[in-house]
Amino acid sequence: MTAQRAVKRIAVLGCSGSIGRSTLAVVAAYPQRFRAVALAAAHYSERLLAQVRQFQPEVVALQDMAAATRLAADLMDTPIQVLSGEAGVATVAAWPTADLVVSAVTGFAGLAPTLQAIRAGKDVALANKECLVAAGQLFMDEVRRHGVALIPIDSEHNAVFQVLNPQHELRQIILTASGGPFLGWDRDRLARISVEQALHHPTWTMGAKITIDSATLMNKGLEVIEAHWLFGVAAEKIAVIVHPESVIHSIVEYQDGSMLAQMGVPDMRTPIVVALAWPERVTQPMCRLDLTQLSQLTFRAPDRAAFACLDLAYQALRTGGLATTILNAANEVAVAAFLAGRIGFTVIADVIRATLEAVPNQEAGSFSVVFEADRLARATAQRFVDHWDDRGIG
Ligand SMILES: NC(=O)c1ccc[n+]([C@@H]2O[C@H](COP(=O)([O-])OP(=O)(O)OC[C@H]3O[C@@H](n4cnc5c(N)ncnc54)[C@H](OP(=O)(O)O)[C@@H]3O)[C@@H](O)[C@H]2O)c1
């Protein structure tokens, strides 16, 4: 007789976004395994209201106060608690009945609630890579101090997590990159890209910020930093290879030359279901790869000259201290400016480089130092954006 498995209770930070929606799709597909007990997002939307009505969580928080008031009015006929503001999102992150918190807020804004979850002793399924980019050492110290599990959702890191054997010394981790929509384009062509073109990713459907990060290859740079902190591997041992089919999600090469890879369709529900069920596995896959339908798997080196963001991320990781905090903040500002039509695609890397040069680096000694560096880097990057003209930074 097999023992009845307890239902795992899940809190989802960023429930209305791309990862949040995929997470709730996984929860809906395995009602005997998972239940969504707490949800958080930033704004009110019909989609969010539909999610709340479908999943009937114990609590939902919206960062936007007015949005939370509107949601509370809509949910008057239910026992669901509605909370508001950053404090409300933090309460959801530490929700007492949740066993696992999915961290899927986008950007640096995800750091504070994810820390709340860790400090409340919750296991975390981490999609938000900016937490580790901005505050890697401090964040991992907090994970160790509270003895919680940190399971990566990012498909590359989820792949490494599945094939990494800590007893065997590795030669390198090879992160695969789709190459984005502009694979093979030179810098002149890249300079004329429109927002619509950049938002059209060839293999993955994702939120706007990460879609632009994928197009600039900054996403891969952020993932190199994420892998460094998650797996304790030096920058020199983390390589990036372009693999446009996005079927091999990453590779671990051991000292004897053996390479272990994880494969699957490019659909985030696979790494999400792995993270939610870990250390167990579900028995019915949500998506399956049909190997007979694969005609070829191709690989090539990234074009580091045309896609300058990748090396900016490597440099920041090697520099250490607050460099990756500054890199992350400048990237968020530059991507937002590109999405608003204020700067060109190749200017994103220029703004980040200029911000890294302008903001003083120091040891990332505490979270308050990190938050202050993030604030200063944002203000500096914003000034570069505001004074940008065709000749360079004003
Ligand atoms: N999408 C992917 O396939 C993918 C893959 C790997 C890793 N990731 C990482 O996962 C994270 C989320 O990406 P995404 O593509 O899902 O982003 P997204 O579609 O833009 O969704 C972001 C979510 O965060 C919420 N949010 C934003 N600011 C918030 C705040 N201050 N408090 C509470 N909620 C807030 C948004 O709420 P509203 O909708 O109300 O604004 C939304 O639910 C990113 O760090 C990304 O790098 C994503």
Image: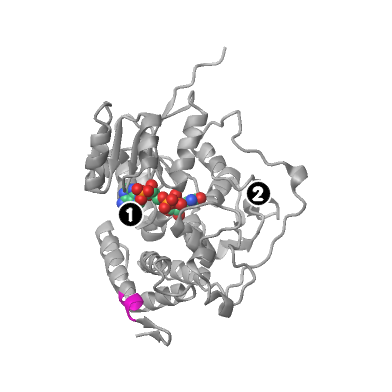
Q: Position of residue 11 (x, y in %)?
A: 37, 36
- Please give left or right for residue 51 compared with residue 182 in the image: left
Q: Does 386 appear in magenta? A: yes
Question: Mark 1: is the Cβ under 8 angstroms from ligand 1?
Answer: yes
Q: Position of residue 93 (x, y in %)?
A: 31, 40
The residue sitting at 57% across, 12% down in the picture is: 1
Q: Does 41 appear in magenta? A: no
Which amino acid, by three-letter code, is at mark 2?
Ala
The residue sitting at 44% across, 69% down in the picture is: 316
Total number of numbered discs in the rendering: 2
- Please give left or right for residue 309 compared with residue 36 in the image: right
Q: Earlier in the sequence, mark 2 or mark 1?
A: 1
Q: Which residue is mark 2?
A: 261
Front residue (pair 90, 191): 191
State the extent of the magenta-drawn residues as a range. 383-387
Which amino acid, by three-letter code, is at mark 1?
Ala
Residue 206, can we see it? yes
Considering the image in quadrants, where does the C terminus appear?
Answer: bottom left
Residue 229, can we see it? no
The residue tagged with tag 1: helix, strand or loop? helix
Q: Which residue is mark 1?
A: 109
- Please give left or right for residue 153 compared with residue 38 in the image: right
Residue 61 picture quarter: top left
Residue placed farthest to the bottom in the image? 391
For discs 2 and 1, the disc positioned in front in the rendered view: 1
- Magenta: main secondary structure equals helix
Front residue (pair 369, 154): 154
Q: Position of residue 352 (x, y in %)?
A: 41, 73
Q: CA distance from mark 2 to mark 1?
A: 32 Å
